[in-house]
Image (cartoon, helix red, strand yellow):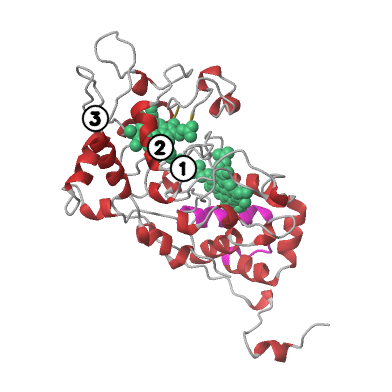
Amino acid sequence: MALSLSQCRKSEPIYSSSSVSFKPTPIVSTSIFPRALGIPDLPKDNPLTEEGVYLGRLLFYDKLLSANMTISCASCHLQKNAFAEPKKTSTGIFGLPVKRNASALFNMAYSRKFFWDGRQSRLANLVFEPIQAHNEMGLNLPELDDRLKKSELYQNWFKKAFNADPNIGQMSMAMEQFLLTLVSSNSRFDKAGPSLTGLSSSEKAGFTLFQTLTNLQGGQNQGADCFHCHGGILFQAQNPLAGGITNNGLDASFTDLGAGAITGNSTDNGTFKSPSLRNISLTGPYMHDGRFQSLNEVIDHYSDNIDFSSPNISPNLANHVSGPGGPPEQMRLTVTQKQDLLNFLQTLTDSTFISNPKYSNPF
Ligand code: HEC
Ligand code: HEC
C-alpha cells in the first residue's frame, strides 16, 4: 500500500520527477582548485555543476551500487583516512578478499594514471571496475540501471543534474565530478609556505632530507632523496617515466606484477604508481599490498632494506653508490634523520580535508 501524498508532505515535500527543474549551477574551477596546485585540465565533456557533484556524492555513499546492498564506495574509501582505509588489503562483497590496499582519493583532477598499476586514465571509466568486480561490489550494469531508474531520489537528481532519466553513462559522469572535487592542499606544510614558517627545526631538517640527493660520500648519506618520485606540490611524480610508475626495491621476485601485468612488458614488472605523500600519516598500511603498518617501517625500508636485486629497480635508488662504478648501497639514515623525516611527513596531513562536510556521507 502506498502512503497518501498528504501523509508524506508532513515531513518532506515529495517531488515527482516531472516537477523537478533543470537549472544546473556551474562550478567555477577557481572556487575548488587552489592557486598553489593550479587549475587542472578537466574533462571537456563533463563540466562540473553543483547538482552533478551532489549526485556523484550520493552514488559514492550508496550501497544500492552493490549486489546485496551492503557495500558502497565509501565502505573501502573512508573520509577520516583521506579516503583510504586502515586495512592491509580490502574486503569486498560477501567478505571476498581484494588483493591490493585501497588507494587514498584526493587531487585526482591532476592525475591521468589511476590504480596502483596506472591501468585507468579516466575516472568516469574507472568507476565501472569496482561496481562490477565480483569481489568488490559485484553488481551488473543492467541491474544497476534498473535500480537507479526505479529510485525516486535518483529520478530527481538525474533530472536536476542532466535533465535525463537515470542512466549508467551519466551515473559515471556524476561520480567523476564528485571525485574531481576531492581536493587537499591545507596541511601544516602548505600553511608554512616556501619559507617553512612555523615548522620545527626537526620538520625543516626532514624536508631538507626529503629534497636532497642521497649522494653517498665516504658511506655517509647527504639526503634521503624522496623528491624524485614523490616530489612537487602534489608530492607525487606525475610522469610515469620519471618515477610516476616505478619499482622502489621491495622484492626480488613479484607475486603482483603491477604495471607489467597491464602492458605485458617484462621491464614493467614490479612497477607501481608512486602515491602522493600528502595525508600519508592517515592512509596506512602502506604500499600496494599494505605490507608496512607504519611510516617507521617505510622509512626503514628506504634507509636500510632496499632490495637491489629487484628486477627493474628504479635507477634513482640503484644509484646510491659511494664512488663511481661502485655497487649500490643502503643510504643508512641515522636515528635522528629518520625521526626528522617522519616529523616532516606528518606535516603533510590536511585535517580540514577529512572534516570537510562537502565530502561526507549525504544520507
Ligand atoms: C572492496 C573495497 C573497494 C570498494 C567497494 C571500492 N574501492 Fe576503490 N579502490 C580499492 C582498492 C583496493 C583500490 C586499489 C586497486 C588497484 O590499484 O588495483 C582502489 C582504487 C581506487 C581508485 C584509484 C585512485 C588512484 O589515485 O589511483 C579510485 C578512483 C577508486 N578506487 C574509486 C572508487 C569508487 C568510485 C568506488 C565505488 C564505485 C570504489 N572505489 C569502490 C578498494 C575499493
Ligand atoms: C624511485 C622512486 C621512489 C623514491 C626515490 C621513493 N619512493 Fe616512495 N614509493 C615509490 C613507489 C613506486 C611506491 C609504491 C610501491 C608499491 O606499492 O609497490 C612508493 C610508496 C611509498 C609510500 C607508501 C605510500 C602509500 O600510500 O602506501 C611511502 C610512505 C613512501 N613511498 C615514502 C617515501 C619516502 C619517505 C622516500 C624517501 C626516503 C621515498 N618514498 C622515495 C617510489 C619511490
Pick whichever of labels 1 and 3 is earlier in the sequence: 3
- Residue 77 percent location from the top left of the image: 54, 53
Q: Nearer the viewer, residue 329 or 28?
A: 329
Tag 3: amino acid: Gly
User: Label 2: how many residues lie within 10 Å, few (<14), some (14-19) or many (20+)?
Assistant: some
* Residue 82, quarter of picture: bottom left
In this view, 299 is above or below 347: above
In this view, 163 is above or below 297: below
Determine if the magenta segment contains residue 179.
yes
- Residue 106 percent location from the top left of the image: 44, 51
Residue denoted by label 3: 223
Region in magenta: 161-181
As helix, strand or loop, the secondary structure at mark 1 comes to: loop
Q: Nearer the viewer, residue 51 or 79?
A: 79
Q: Is mark 3 within 8 Å of ligand 2?
A: no
Question: Quarter of the image containing the N terminus?
Answer: bottom right
Tag 2: amino acid: Glu
Image check: 58 left or right of 285? right
Residue lying farthest to the front in this orientation:
335
Tag 1: amino acid: Gln
Residue denoted by label 1: 293
Q: Give the image quadrant in which the ligand numbered 2 is located.
A: top left
- Residue 301 percent location from the top left of the image: 39, 31
Question: Quarter of the image containing the C terminus?
Answer: bottom right
* CB under 8 Å between discs 2 and 1: yes
